[in-house]
Image (tube, rainbow, N blue to C red):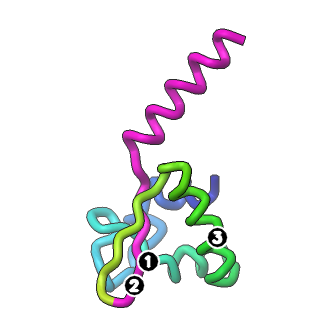
Amino acid sequence: MTILRLLADPARHFADQWSADPVEFGVCMKLIARALKIAQPTVSRHLDILKQADFIIIRKREKWSHCKRNEPAIRDYLDWLSQELKAA
């Protein structure tokens, strides 16, 4: 959840990124690890889970991987969850 929250406002949380525009292209995995104060392999595992859930998109640029929220997929999931909770 913290990763998704940080990626919701990349201009604010990752304004120092120079490898690509964090809003347009996504945020470098190294910067996400730094923001969370965890090792890069650990953040990579969390990002992989988010990617498998389709909540983020990972794009390569040169030697860096950048992450961006997949807003349509997140909205679809929230709509589904809302409907499921109403039916319960």
Q: Quadrant of the C terminus?
A: top right
What secondary structure prevails in the magenta region?
A: helix
Report the label total.
Answer: 3
- Per the image, the residue denoted by label 3 is 45
* Dot 2 alpha-carbon crowd within 10 angstroms: few under 14, some 14 to 19, many 20 or more: few
Whether the magenta-drawn stretch holds residue 86 is answered as: yes
Q: Is residue 66 left or right of residue 4?
A: left
Q: Which residue is mark 2?
A: 64
- Label 1 sits on what residue type? Cys
Query: Is residue 76 inside the magenta stretch?
Result: yes
Which stretch is magenta?
63-88
> In the rendered view, does 88 fall on the left or right side of 66?
right
First of labels 3, 2 by sequence position: 3
The residue lying furthest to the top in this view is 87
Measure the alpha-carbon separation of dots 3 and 2.
16 Å
Which residue sits at x=36%, y=67%? 26
Residues at marks 1 and 3 touching, judged by CB atoms closer than 8 Å: no
Whole-Å distance between the Cαs marked 1 and 3?
A: 14 Å
Identify the secondary structure beneath mark 2: strand
Classify mark 1: helix, strand or loop. strand
Q: Which x, y percent locates residue 50?
A: 56, 56
Instruction: Identify the residue position indicated by label 1 in the image.
Output: 28
- Check the image and report above or below for 17 versus 63: above
Which residue sits at x=65%, y=81%?
41
Residue type at mark 2? Trp
The residue that appears at 44% across and 77% down in the rendered structure is: 28
User: Residue at coordinates 60% horizontally, 78% vertically from top-left?
Assistant: 33
Asked if marks 2 and 1 touch (Cβ < 8 Å), the reply is yes
